[in-house]
Amino acid sequence: MTREGHATVINRADYSAPAFWIDTVDLSFDLDPVKTRVLNRMTLRRNPDVAAQSLKLDGEELNLARVLVNGQGTSFKLEGNKLVLENLPEGTEPFQLEIFTTCAPVKNTSLSGLYVSQDSFFTQCEAEGFRRITYFLDRPDVMAMYTVTLRADKTKYPVLLSNGNLVDSGTLDDGRHFAKWVDPHKKPSYLFALVAGQLVAREQRITSRAGQDHLLQVFVRPGDLDKTEHAMNSLMASVAWDEARFGLPLDLERFMIVATSDFNMGAMENKGLNIFNTKYVLANQATATDVDYANIESVVGHEYFHNWTGNRITCRDWFQLSLKEGLTVFRDQEFSQDMCDGVSARAVKRIEDVRVLRTVQFPEDAGPMSHPVRPDSYIEINNFYTVTIYEKGAEVVRMMQTLVGRDGFAKGMKLYFERFDGQAVTCDDFAQSMADANPESSLSQLLPQFKLWYSQAGTPHLGASGYFDAAAQTYTLQFKQTCAPAAGLADKQPFVIPVLLGLVGSGSGAALPLTVQGSVDAAAANHLFVMTGDTAAITFTGVQEAPVPSILRGFSAPVVLDFDYSDAQLLTLLASDPDPFNRWEAGQRLALRNAITSIATYVDSTRASALNNAYVQAMRSVLRHPTLDAAFKELVLTLPSETYIAEQLDVVDPQRIHAVREAMRLQLAVELQADWQWAFETHQDNGAYRPDATSAGRRALVGMALANLCLAATQTGDAVWPGKALQRFKVATNMTDRISALQALVTSGHALAAPALAKFHALFKNEELVLDKWFALQAGAPDRNGLVLPAVRQLMAHPDFNIRNPNRARSLIFSYCSGNPGGFHRPDAAGYVYWSERVLELDSINPQVAARLARALDRWKRLVEPYRSAACEALKRVAAKTDLSNDVREVVDRALAD
Ligand code: B3K
Ligand code: ZN
């Protein structure tokens, strides 16, 4: 039994409609940090489709004072976390239910429900936080109309916000005031929100294409207004994009974003009142990097797009989470691409998205937390806000778009809204709409099989081999798909895999025209091959030159492609593939191959052989390439991460991987020294700061060059580049340049790193988000002589460290445990001991954050000894605690299960 007392498994198959509907909710809050009083007056009626039952309302951490039915006292029971009412009016007539409770926001450290952050009130209700505010049918298929009255001290909480429109406000006795909000749309309880505090707003009035006027507001603490311009621009761009691309307008007079420093995740799409982690709102050039700017644009877009995909049409139950999340991630990815200023920048964004999928989701899908995009069971739903639901879910939606085309996809969206607007529905409903809107498409013909992407966990492997018949001028590709058992499912049916492919001449490097044998279609540059069986083959005719196949262009399916490319073939693709994704991919494959060979032949860290000459030369050509964009070059020159390398191996020795990758980095730094210097000098961006993709790409490449030049200096003893880095750090006029200079010193382990870090702290001691970077930089530094862990432990005692603040906890603890494999996997197990201490410490404060940290050891079973036993012991130490939260319990129990 866990401390929450309900470690039950919830099964998708057990779904049943609610016994009651709630039509209206009228909430009154008397806000007080210590004791907030909540009066909840609801109109309910029995669901005629469900046999008469008692009403069981969810509630957690509430003090119940009064229950009235139609104004009269009534009998009730408390059963665990449920308030049970049995003597309710018969029949389907509506009745009134009034519940009065109190709660203690200041004691709420879990940041779920109503809580206090820096003297202001915030809420977080998804997935099941509303039940910490009042008793309710806290499930997404119960959608109601909300009226909310907030009362609070006027001086301490001058701004009072909730969903919808402000219909009344005024002063009360005793220095208090009130505001009354009415949401014109019905919604599930997880989209409820309130905010009260000392806030100021950037405001913008806009007129939509359809001629409607709207007020956009971004609320922040006083003093932060100068950091809200980019968020507001991103919001305006999002509104315009959804209307232009999908015909989905803003359906509210007022749309608000509020930023808070204490937040469990990135942001939350509450109807008309999005609440954001400050990290995804606040930016100016002095405090935020180019990456921060891009993230803000994408998260603002994501939450805004939920207004239709999630809020207007929501999920029937939490197993359908990817219905809104996969679709909305797909939409935010498309938005960010459409905001790019060219083909190359679009490709860069795609590569970045795929990199996340492969370094985080693929391991998840091969580990103990593997689950299908539509899971079948869970213990704690908060553990299923995963990269599988989000990023793999987005890939599933992307494959639908690939199969029906961009216009067909827009038609499918239109039909989805015609059918389901205002309802709580399932992933099946979405897929069916897409298929029905495109009856001629392969999606429509293959729908039941396509939907295996929702039900079968695990990453499929797509094996391919090619045969060129020079005499017949044909080229045949043979495919075979397999998928290892995952999430308890051994026998899997074949997936529908859209394989976008092309051929590149092995001698000429030219894009070869594609004519499929037996087809009458004109030759094309790309061919979409839809694989449905376990095996398949395709033959191209008129192939005049031995080709190199470019398979899975743009990463057209979330699979692992196994093709036995020769180095020469990969070098051809790297030099000439017209598909930028596969061009980048060829470089990654070459690097990976070098890494795997070095790991297999590893003797000790001083003798790690690393990169072959062909690879180094190829990297020089890319770096010096006259037409490739800087951002693309930076991606190609970035070696696969230690985590990604580890994923390719059956047995993982994290220290070997670390040593080999460090040797590879050093070799590239030294052998390309002159080229790095050239890149550094020729890509300077000296104009006014703009966070657009092109300028950001130049800064990224310059930062990379500087890091390499400082790294090379560790070999040559040269003091010039570290000196230049320090100088650049001091005079930088934007955070991107400043932090990349600092990083160059830190990652090269130069003695100047320490004074620079001290200076950085002094400069930004009042900037929370910058201090997070300061902690993260140190916790993520390459480990030399095992010094990172002691530094991390010391930083925990720093006056600026506060484990209760999720951003700060992530910046120090997660950066070390999840972001620094070389520092974390120590032969003396001290990293794992630290991890287990922090998981337990965090679990008593904030179970959601603790459970995320708990996942740092997901892949322990593949570790080589002594790591494997030590990791197992650390997991067992956590699991042995009897009063763990459901969140952490589910993660560690799954990790330890056979
Ligand atoms: N829907 C929220 C995530 C809620 C997480 C709850 N543990 C943010 C988003 O995906 O937009
Ligand atoms: Zn989302």
Image (cartoon, grey):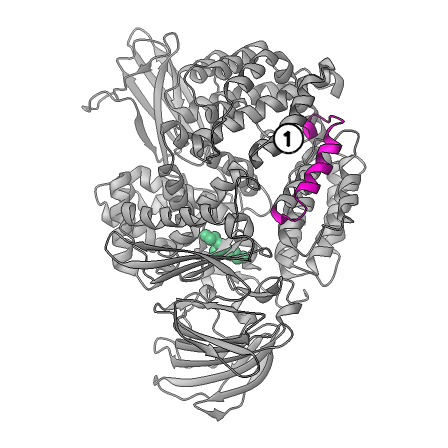
Q: Secondary structure at mark 1?
A: helix
Magenta-highlighted stretch: main secondary structure?
helix
> Does the image show residue 33?
yes
Report which residue position mark 1 lands on: 729
Comparing 732 with 808, the one in front is 732
Q: Is residue 165 left or right of residue 383?
A: left
Where is 819 relative to 566, above or below? below
Q: Which residues are magenta?
A: 745-769
Comparing 750 with 667, the one in front is 750
Neighbour tally class for label 1: few under 14, some 14-19, many 20 plus, Cα within 10 Å: many
> Does the image show residue 378?
no
> x and y percent of residue 303 in the render?
43, 53
Quarter of the image where the N terminus is located: bottom right
Q: Quadrant of residue 42?
A: bottom left
> x and y percent of residue 741 in the render?
63, 29
Comparing 570 with 356, the one in front is 356
Q: Is residue 7 left or right of residue 602?
A: left
Residue sitting at x 34%, y 69% = 184
